[in-house]
Image (cartoon, rainbow, N blue to C red):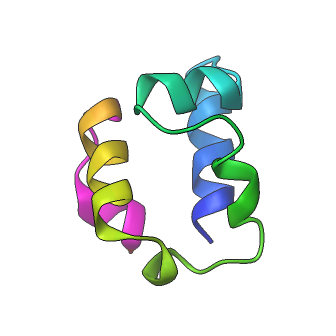
Amino acid sequence: MLFNKVKKYCEDNNLSVSAFEKQCNLSNGTVSKWKDVPADKVQLKTLKRIATGTGTPLEDWIG
């Protein structure tokens, strides 16, 4: 699940989820909506924002 990957990324990089959302240009509360959503159900433009904001390849977030 994408939510778990984001949480792990935040823990590894000493970020709050809110800071992650700002870093990736996402609306406040976006990540919490993904708790039960597979990554392939998240919009591609959102995944691209995450990849760009974190400098992590898109495939790492989807796979």
At which x and y percent is residue 11? 68, 30
Residue displayed at 35% across by 33% down? 54
Locate the C terminus and report the quarter of the image it occupies.
bottom left
Q: Position of residue 57 (x, y in %)?
A: 22, 51
Please say if 63 is above or below 2. below
Q: Which segment is the magenta one?
A: 54-62
The structure residue drawn at horizontal position 76% and vertical position 52%, both measured from the top left corner, is: 32
**Residue drawn at point x = 62 percent, y = 72 percent:** 1
Residue 52: percent from left, percent from top: 24, 38
In the drawing, does residue 3 fall left or right of residue 27?
right
Identify the residue shown where x is 26% and y is 66%. 59
Q: Nearer the viewer, residue 36 or 57?
A: 36
Q: Is residue 14 above or below residue 47?
A: above
Q: Is residue 1 above or below residue 11?
A: below
- Side of 53 relative to 21 (left or right): left
The image shows residue 37 at horizontal and vertical percentages of 66, 77
* Residue 63 belongs to magenta span: no
Q: In the image, is residue 57 part of the stretch drawn in magenta?
A: yes
Image quadrant assignment for residue 8: top right
Quarter where residue 4 is shown: bottom right
Majority secondary structure in the magenta region:
helix
